[in-house]
Structure formats: C-alpha cells, structure tokens
Amino acid sequence: MAIAALIVVILVEHILPEPRTALPLLIVIPTMTLIGLRGTWRPLAVGLITLITTLVVGLPQFHMRPGTVLTCVIGVVLSTLISWAAAISFDRQRRTLTDLRTVADAAQRALLRPLPGAIGDLRIEVRYLAAAAEAHVGGDLYDVVHTPHGVRLIVGDVMGKGLPAVEAAADVLGSFREAAHDQERLYDLAQRIDATLRRRAESTGFATAVVGTILLGDGQANLMVCGHPPPLVLRDGKVYTVSVPEPHPPLGLLDLAIGSRQPTSIGFEPGDCLLLYTDGITEARNRDGQFYPLEDRVTALAVEDPDELLGAIYRDLLKHVGGRLLDDAALLLIQRSRD
C-alpha cells in the first residue's frame, strides 16, 4: 500500500501544473507501513525509498522552493524514524500478547481441561461460550470424571468476576476432581467442595452448581442442584426441566441446608440426553430485554446428535442476543447410548 501511494504521489507531482504542491505528501508514506505491519524493517525500507524519491524529485526544484524541499526531506526522515519506533513498540506488544494468550491457553487446559468424548455408554459434549473473543477462562466451570462410584459431573458458576472468580473456579474444580474419587455419597462430595470455598482467604462468596453421578448401564442419574438452574432432559424429541423437590443452597453456603441431604434421582434411559448449563445461557437477553428461552428453543431445534445440538444452540443464542454475549456460559450434554 505504501509503495502504491508513493507511485500515486509521483504521478500527481508530474501531472500538476506549476507550482507543484504534491511533494509534501511524501512525508506520510512511511507511516502507511504501520497498516498491517509485518516486521520492524518495513518502515526503514519504505522510508529509505521515500527519501531517495524525495531527493530525486525535489532536487531539481530546490532552486525554486528550497524551503519546501528541505522540509519534505526532514519530514520524511522524521516520519521514518517515528514509524520505525512505533513498529518496534507494536512488535513488542504483539509478542507480549502472544505470550499472554499462550499462558491463557495453558490455564484454560488446566482449568477447563478437554473432556473425554465418551465414557462407557455415555457420550459427552461440551461448549464454553465466552462473552469476549479474547476470553479463555472465567467463573463458569464444568468437568466430568470416571470414578469407582460412577461418572461424576459438575457444572457451576462462581459468584463474581475477574481473577478472583477464576481462582475460586480453580478451587472448586480441584476439590471436585479429588473428592469425586474419594466420596461415595454425592452429598459428601458437595460438602468437600463447600468446605474448600469456605476456607478461601479471600472468598468470592459462593458458587451455584449441579453435582451429579451417573452409573454406567443404569437407568437413572442422581443430581444435587445447589442454587443452580435445573438441568433439562431430552427424551423422544421432547424436553423436560428436571423437577427438584428439595434444592440445596449454593456451594459455600451448604451449611444453611434444611431438610433432606438426598440427591434428586431422575430416569436416564438409553437415548436420553441430560443438558446442564449456566445462567449465562438463560439470562441472555435480546434487544427487547427478553431472556433466551432455552427449553423452548431446544425443542424447536430438534437436533438429535449431541455435538450438532450444542452447535445449534450456540448459533441460535448468538442470533437471539444480536451476535455478542454479555456473560460467559457453559453447556454440558451427556447422552446415554442406545446400544
């Protein structure tokens, strides 16, 4: 682009009648190299070419307009040096951003590590929906682990934003991954996570979550809904919201629980899908302030393949909000195979 602009200025300089006035336009040519910058050498190379052009075109006119020619030469030199310094600064920022993204990718893999595509007769699909294109991790969390007590799962949302929420989410997932193998009772597993949150020196308060156990080859799933939106069950083309007679308080506030400590048991037959999500989905608003009707939209989408269904929900959600989410969200879909 810079070379093309240089050629245009030269042509204009020769086309214009006397007295010519296009020469000062050469001063801006080196700065054009900052558009789509590729390497710190380009401003120097283009600046050198522009300086030579300025001398070749300007020297024959020096006796008539010495001030204009001298100003153009000095301007091109300064423009080149400034552009070169800016290119170096941009390159350093780019390298720093690349390093930060690398660290963010590593943090995401450690915090929201890839899930197995299948465990026994269970197929597992997940989507993490970031509110910003640069986002990698946040306060929303999910995990699925195969343990001696069955397939343990968690989907949750830590109260708060920023680094404290990420740290709390890391604590929740770390506690879940450890206790899921040790605790046979689902309530005891939830208590371990609850204790971890309450021990935090700088507690973010609490985390809403659904903690569950699914036995391979069994016809049911056990769930503890701790202040979190209840999951959906997809069966034979119909969608049902899981009824939770006795919901539990959020993790971090579990000691406020009154009543039964038993989980909610639901039927989970071959072909059924269990859809867990965070409130970033159901609280997403369109321009009219209407929330995203997840249950209705899943019914309308009528997609049976788990991966395709999550992709359809994601596209439909973005269409609902006008292309951008205001909050992070997570979707976890577990399907029991018919085979």
Image (cartoon, rainbow, N blue to C red):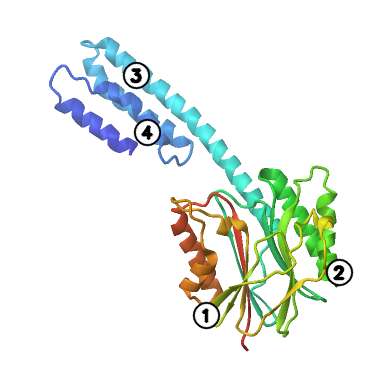
Mark 3 and mark 4: span between their CA atoms? 17 Å
Return the residue at label 4.
32
SS under mark 4? helix
SS under mark 1? loop
Q: Could you tell me which residue is drawn at 37 percent across and 23 percent down?
A: 76
Q: Quadrant of residue 244?
A: bottom right
Density class for disc 4 (Cα within 10 Å; few <14, some 14-19, many ≥20) is some
Return the residue at label 3.
73
SS under mark 2? loop
Mark 2: which amino acid?
Answer: Gln
Q: Quadrant of residue 46?
A: top left
Q: Is residue 20 left or right of residue 229?
A: left
Return the residue at label 1.
237
Q: Is residue 304 above or below residue 174?
A: below
**Mark 1 or 3 closer to N-term?**
3
Q: Could you tell me which residue is drawn at 53 percent across and 65 percent down?
A: 294
Q: Could you tell me which residue is drawn at 51 percent across and 59 percent down?
A: 292
Mark 2 and mark 1: span between their CA atoms? 35 Å
**Mark 1 or 4 closer to N-term?**
4
- Can the viewer see residue 178? no
Q: Is residue 287 above or below residue 125?
A: above
